[in-house]
Image (spheres, rainbow, N blue to C red):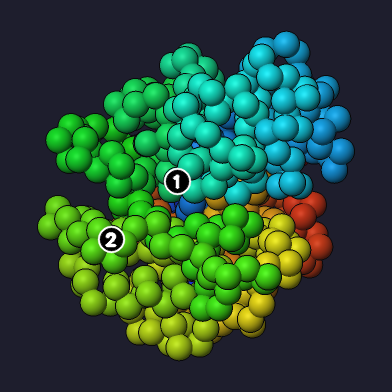
Amino acid sequence: MKLFKNATFYTMEEENKKTNMVLTDKGVIIATGNDCLSYEPNEIVDLNGSYVFPGFTDAHMHLIGYGRKLLANVIKTNDVINEIKNFYNSEDLFVEGYFDSGLTKDDLDVISSDYMIILRHNDYHSFTVNSKVLEKIRFEHKTGILLEEDAKKVLPIWSNYSKELLEKMTNKAILSLYKYGITGVHTDDLSYFNSYQETLGILNEITKEYPFRINMLIHYDVFDEYIANYNIDNKYLKDIQVKLFYDGTISSKTALLKENYKNLNTNGLRMDSEKIFLEKIKKIRDNKHSVAIHTIGDLALSEVTNILIKYKNDNEMIDRIVHASLADMETINKLSKSNIALDIQPLFIESDKEIISENINHNPLIYPFKEYSDHCIILNGSSDAPVENPNPLLGIYHMGISRYESIKAYTVNPGITINDNIGMIKVGYKADFSAFSKDLMTISLEQLKENEVYATIIDEKIVYRNEEE
């Protein structure tokens, strides 16, 4: 038994409910407050006056993809072409973090037409490539700017890594997330790398050395393989909802809107026909699973909400909509009467501001987190890393709702969404804690950006401690 003491513990059972100590055994909370005094712990952990919350979860990200970005060439300035030239070293060049500035294959061919050059757009749905890449994938294209389905032709090249490098990426990602106080993620990784089985094996093995709650979305592309082969027994791994895509992204002008994009005769696209999409939903339901559906445009959100209400979910886990970037009040009212969670990315408010103003003609509700919260819709905080910084305090800073509800989005709500005993400090819940040097509930908004993680605790083990504290 371990006694965690000398801290203020916010239980998150209700607003401002606190306790002064927590007792754990075999990774589970067995007592809080004065009830701890009835036991004789084997170990006492002094948390040095910190402020402790249930372990924070990033509810939508790409764990291995985040690790890849930490190791990758990343565009960091507006002088894109010169940055690419500086990265280039007479070998194939893969670059992340590119905001589409109009470069084409012709621009990249000036740098090299002998080696592949691939720029992955910041929306992670698009690529700009040189002629060598088009030759490699046997695809003719006028500009080399590949969106959605065309972009998928590049993925086998982009994601072709050795197992050792994928392990290194995963390791790098987990160690980085520890420093943000993140104890677990809901991650979409299983269809993007060499194979489903290899990726699953890497995630399974890594947790034997690095405790971390990896809750895995099952991409529909590997759903059949998952049904046939999933047999993992690992307390840190959990299979959760099935990932589907309904529309695209705003920057690629493929998010499905209620009106056309500025200066274009298109309002975006549906990734599947209605017939095919409903067949997928029915198959998932027949196999007793819930869904997580990528949905960005306001028309997409309306249609997906109607589909999920019609095709009821009788499973232990609730359905979820990923992004829900644009909305209208009619859809919000429908969502408020349903049991559907929304995976939101608060940092998109800042990074998408210019993209939305440049591309959208009409006036949908844009990242309406307050309206969602006011209508009691379950909100899960997330980063979509590697798209955004996974620091949850930055997410809380940008969310624009009450501090308690913002913190719930990273603690209580992700646990509800996957039907797991995480996200509260109460008896029977997992002993995962995020300890901070300052009180998240009372410090100013600006101080959130400066707050330091004191310690990250998973399964009652201290996996990270800030040595400077």
Q: Residues within 10 Å of mark 2 (few under 14, many from 20)?
A: some
The quadrant in which residue 393 appears is: bottom right
| Residue 399 lies in quadrant | bottom right
> Which residue is under mark 1?
149
Q: Which of 275 and 211 is in front in this view?
A: 275
Q: Name the residue under label 2.
A: 277
As displayed, is residue 152 above or below residue 364? above
Residue at the spot 75% in from the left edge and 52% down from the top edge: 451
Where residue 209 sits: x, y (%)?
44, 22
- Against 423, residue 42 (above or below) is above
For the question of whether residue 284 can be seen, the reply is yes
- Count the labels in the image: 2
Q: What residue type is labelled 1?
A: Glu
- Residue 316 percent across, percent down from the top left: 22, 61
Quadrant of the image occupied by residue 24: top left
Give the left or right position of residue 233, taking residue 442 as reference.
Answer: left
Disc 2 element: helix
Q: Can residue 353 be seen here?
A: no
For the residue marked with disc 2, what is the amino acid? Answer: Phe
On the image, the x and y values in percent for residue 402 come to 63, 75
Q: Horizontal placement of 458 versus 231: left or right?
A: right
Q: Nearer the viewer, mark 2 or mark 1?
A: 1
Left or right: residue 202 versus residue 58 is left
The answer to which of 347 and 142 lies nearer the viewer is 142
Q: If the image is split into quadrants, where does the N terminus sit? A: top left
Q: For numbered disc 1, what is the local secondary structure?
A: helix
Q: How far apart are marks 2 and 1 (CA)?
A: 16 Å
The answer to whether residue 155 is above or below residue 302 is above
